[in-house]
Image (tube, helix red, strand yellow):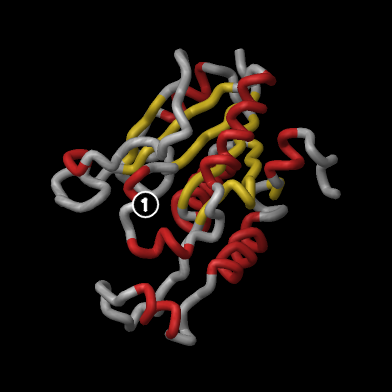
Amino acid sequence: MNRAALVVIDVQESFRQRPLWAYASQPDIVGQVGRLVDAARRRGDLVVWVLHAEPGTGAVFDPASGHVRLIDGLAPVEGEPMLVKTAHNAFTTTNLQQLLTLAGVREVTVCGIRTEQCVETTTRLGADLGYEMTFVTDAAVTFPIPHRDLPADASPERILADPRTLSTADIVTRTEYALAGRFATIRTVAELTGAVPAGV
């Protein structure tokens, strides 16, 4: 029985196909996630991989596009579940909760792409379900968020030039503030891999 699990959310090629990938908050997401995965495996923790899919859309999250796959450099090993979700959080359209329950998991660490969206919503729901959640702040990626009044097809240059755009630094700060002490413990890759003591 595993008491702890690492859930890797949406670290997939789909995001690399979007123009805003060049402005990702954590360019070394594969390296950071890889270090977490290696540490989790050494401890004997359950590692769960989650991908996001939007079937039938014809876009980068449509499985038919070929981009709904892990970014090169990451791969599950035998016995590690690979789930596909169609909602933002990793619970409601998958059997993640069942997997965690069957494995005896009570502590869940999350990382992945869309700090304030898929990773945060999974963290909040996991806390509501009674798990002790850890949010790995530097193994989560986000992108500048354009103001709602900008057209959906606005270029990255226009998004970045707009003073109303929410920067990645602001997104990370706000997400940590909302989660810490309420829904999760905030930790870094270095803390969780033993490179530095927690809280230093």
Q: For residue 95, which quarter of the picture?
A: top left
Name the residue located 25 percent from the left edge and 50 percent from the top edge.
Answer: 60
Q: Left or right: where does residue 53 sit relative to residue 57?
A: right
Image spot of residue 196 (x, y percent) = 82, 41
Name the residue located 33 percent from the left edge and 39 percent from the top edge.
Answer: 85
Q: For residue 53, which quarter of the picture?
A: top left
The residue closer to the viewer here, 86 or 196, is 196
Image spot of residue 75 (x, y percent) = 45, 27
Q: For residue 147, which quarter of the picture?
A: bottom left
Residue, disc 1: 15
Residue sticking out furthest to the bottom: 163
Name the residue located 57 percent from the left edge and 34 percent from the top edge.
Answer: 34
Above or below, 157 relative to 81 = below
Picture quarter with the N terminus: top right
Q: How many marks?
A: 1
Name the residue located 53 percent from the left edge and 53 percent from the top edge.
Answer: 27
Image spot of residue 185 (x, y percent) = 70, 47
Query: Label 1: few (<14), some or many (≥20) within 10 Å?
Result: some
Image spot of residue 161 (x, y percent) = 44, 84
Secondary structure found at label 1: helix
Q: What amino acid is found at the position of numbered circle 1 in the picture? A: Phe
Q: Left or right: where does residue 16 sit relative to residue 46?
A: left
Above or below, 100 relative to 87 = above
Q: Left or right: where does residue 83 sit relative to residue 109?
A: left
